[in-house]
Image (cartoon, rainbow, N blue to C red):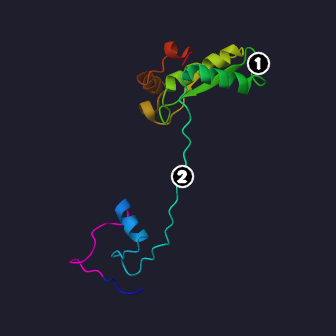
Amino acid sequence: MGESTHSPENSPLTHPATSAGWQQLLDGIDLPFHPDLAVPALREVRLAIPNPDPVADVADAARRAVESTFASSVTPGMTVAVGGGSRGLTQRVDLLRGTIAGLRALGAEPFVVPAMGSHGGGTADGQVKMLASLGMTEESVGAEI
């Protein structure tokens, strides 16, 4: 690789990690990289992310999904553990309540287990308290935790 043509006086101060820096690279502007750094060819990629209509009743949608998905595999009286977690889902309480309702409609006897690692100190009591702090209680989800 050749020497950099930029000096501190004439160097664009945009780091390539910024969107402006990447645009400069795409436009062919030479940025002051270390001479041993090979910058790969860049391509613009666009990702179309589907934007489905919002679900009006999350608990009911979860209940219907559970009933249709597990109708042939859940038998009356079956005990089913359902994980209640602390990360990644919005409307957790509605999802959990709907899941519990769907399992009950199929004749199962669901209960909730905390699905987390070290949250709440990694203890059963601490994790039950963590679920409660997120709104997931026996009363709100309709099952024993």
Residue pictured at 27% horizontal, 69% vertical = 13
Q: Is residue 100 magenta?
A: no
Label 2 sits on a secondary structure element that is loop
Which label number is shown at residue 111? none
Res. 111 in view: no
Name the residue carrying label 2: 47
Residue 11 higher or lower than 130, as above or below: below
x and y percent of residue 137 in the render?
48, 17
Residue 113 higher or lower than 27, as above or below: above
Which one is in front, 61 or 66? 61
Splitting the image into 4 quarters, where does residue 70 fall? top right
x and y percent of residue 91 in the render?
49, 26
Which one is in front, 57 or 119? 57
Label 2 or label 1, whichever lies nearer to me, is: 2
Residue pictured at 72% horizontal, 24% vertical = 68
Q: Residues within 10 Å of mark 1 (few under 14, many from 20)?
A: some
Label 1 sits on a secondary structure element that is loop
x and y percent of residue 98 in the render?
59, 20
Helix, strand or loop for the magenta stretch, by majority? loop
Disc 2 marks which amino acid? Answer: Leu
Question: In the rendered structure, which disc, 2 or 1, sits on the residue that comes first in sequence?
Answer: 2
Name the residue carrying label 1: 75
Residue pictured at 56% horizontal, 35% vertical = 52
x and y percent of residue 42 in the render?
49, 68
Splitting the image into 4 quarters, where does residue 62 fall? top right
Magenta residues?
6-17
Residue 119 higher or lower than 99, as above or below: below
Q: Residue furthest bottom?
A: 2
Placement of the N terminus among the 4 image quadrants: bottom left
Q: Is residue 10 magenta?
A: yes
